[in-house]
Amino acid sequence: ASPIATVAARPYPYSLPLASTAVIMIDFQKDFMLKGGFGDTLKNDVGLLMECVPGAQRLLAVARAAKLPIVHTLEAHKPDLSDLHTSKLTRGNLPEELRIGATGAMGRILVAGEEGNWIIDELVPLPGEELVHKPGKGAFYATGLEPYLKSKGITHLLFAGVTTEVCVQTTMREANDRGYECLLVTDATASYFPAFKDAAIEMIVAQGGIVGWAADSVALEEALK
Ligand code: C5J
């Protein structure tokens, strides 16, 4: 049998099978994390998101050392915006120059291939790591994520990313319903609304782990030593 690590987690210890666990790094994009991107155009304090970068770097280092598959997701639309619902385009009632597809300080907002759509330097993917472009908040909607995970025999997922209560929580709930055993790495995720991050973690671990587990990157590092 392949080795199983035990992570000190809430609501109870998480059993992590090294041969069938992957990491999902969600939307660590300049569009969300830096001035001039989508998050900034929506008047969010993007500096709050940078607080989780050290934890996310620790998670990446631990996962790479343990040779776990790593998936990086990008909230990204095709340049012709054919995968952008009108509901998403018009949400927020923003002026046209601030909408998805408009040209901002780092290129076209939330469009694949633009500078702002790429991942921040600190967390940039290594060659061989999987990239998933997603048009929605959840990473399973309209993407190849599930076939990829199945092809690798993955049963357990470790989650990091931004923002906790939007794309991270949506994806973790989608994964939970698909039968994956999910753990959120609490210092590797952040929100523009710190109270929403805390609430999302509590929602996940409530009722015996109704969505999954939560632990910080140090606990993960300890478990995988
Ligand atoms: C948002 C995300 N918040 N990655 N996207 O619009 O959470």
Image (spheres, grey):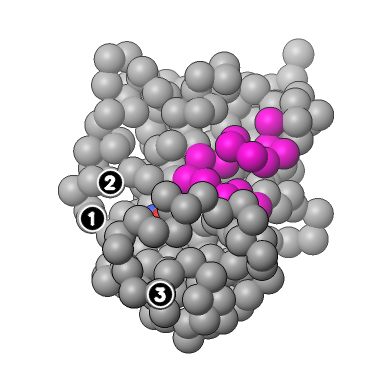
Question: What is the quadrant of residue 47 in the picture?
Answer: bottom left
Q: What is the x, y in percent for residue 112?
A: 65, 65
Disc 2 to disc 3, C-alpha distance: 30 Å
The residue labelled by disc 3 is 96
Q: Residues within 10 Å of mark 2 (few under 14, many from 20)?
A: many
Q: Which mark lies nearer to you, 2 or 3?
A: 3
Q: Is residue 53 above or below residue 107?
A: above
Q: Tell me which amino acid carries mark 1.
A: Phe
Q: Is residue 113 left or right of residue 127?
A: left
Q: Is residue 9 visible?
A: no
Q: On the image, numbered disc 1 is attached to which residue?
A: 193
Q: 14 or 96, which is in the foreground?
A: 96
| Gap between marks 1 and 2 measured at Cα | 7 Å
Residue 99 on image: x %, y %: 43, 69
- At a point 47% along the width and 33% down the height, the residue shown is 172
Element marked by disc 2:
helix
Asked if the residue under mark 3 is in contact with the one under mark 2, i.e. CB atoms within 8 Å, the reply is no
Along the viewing direction, whichever of 15 and 189 lies nearer the viewer: 189
Q: CA distance from mark 3 to mark 1?
A: 25 Å
Label 3 amino acid? Glu
Q: Is residue 95 above or below residue 218?
A: below
Label 1 CA crowd tier, 10 Å (few <14, some 14–19, many 20+)? some
- Residue at 63% over, 75% down: 114
Q: Which residues are magenta?
A: 133-146
Q: Is residue 209 left or right of residue 145?
A: left
- Secondary element at image label 3: helix
Q: Give the left or right position of residue 138, taking residue 131 as reference.
A: left
Q: Which mark is residue 197?
A: 2
Disc 2 residue type? Answer: Lys
From the top left corner, tell me how far across and down residue 222 is, in percent: 49, 40
Q: Is residue 186 left or right of residue 66?
A: left
